Amino acid sequence: MFNDWLQGNATGDTLIRAGAPKNWIVGDKNGAASYGTRNDVAVVWPPNREPIILAIMSRYDKEDPSMMMR
């Protein structure tokens, strides 16, 4: 059930999922914190391999409204 929730999450379509090869299955949960801070945690299933657990957190150095939610 948990994997289904992660794989069905559409808010991460422009994050880890966007950079993964098309034939890989990606389930992720993303979020944001203070201004300019984003995170994405994923389980990635490459074909015929063990799953990969991946966590990325980023923060912009300067407050720039044009960079929000990219």
Image (cartoon, helix red, strand yellow):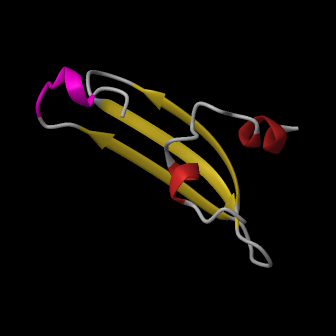
Q: Nearer the viewer, residue 69 or 32?
A: 69
Image height check: is 32 above or below 51? Answer: above
Which image quadrant for residue 1? top right
Q: Quadrant of the C terminus?
A: top left
Q: Is residue 18 left or right of residue 23?
A: left
Q: Nearer the viewer, residue 16 or 56?
A: 16
Residue located at (60% from left, 49% from top): 42
Q: Is residue 26 left or right of residue 18?
A: right
Give residue 60's position: percent from left, percent from top: 20, 37
Give residue 63's position: percent from left, percent from top: 14, 25
Residue located at (57% from left, 38% from top): 12
Residue sitting at the far right: 1
Residue located at (66% from left, 59% from top): 44
Give residue 68's position: percent from left, percent from top: 30, 26
Q: Is residue 34 magenta?
A: no
Residue located at (75% from left, 77% from top): 49
Image height check: is 54 above or below 66? Answer: below
Q: Is residue 33 left or right of residue 31?
A: left
Which image quadrant for residue 38? top left
Q: Is residue 53 left or right of residue 51?
A: left
Query: Which region shows up in magenta?
Result: 62-67
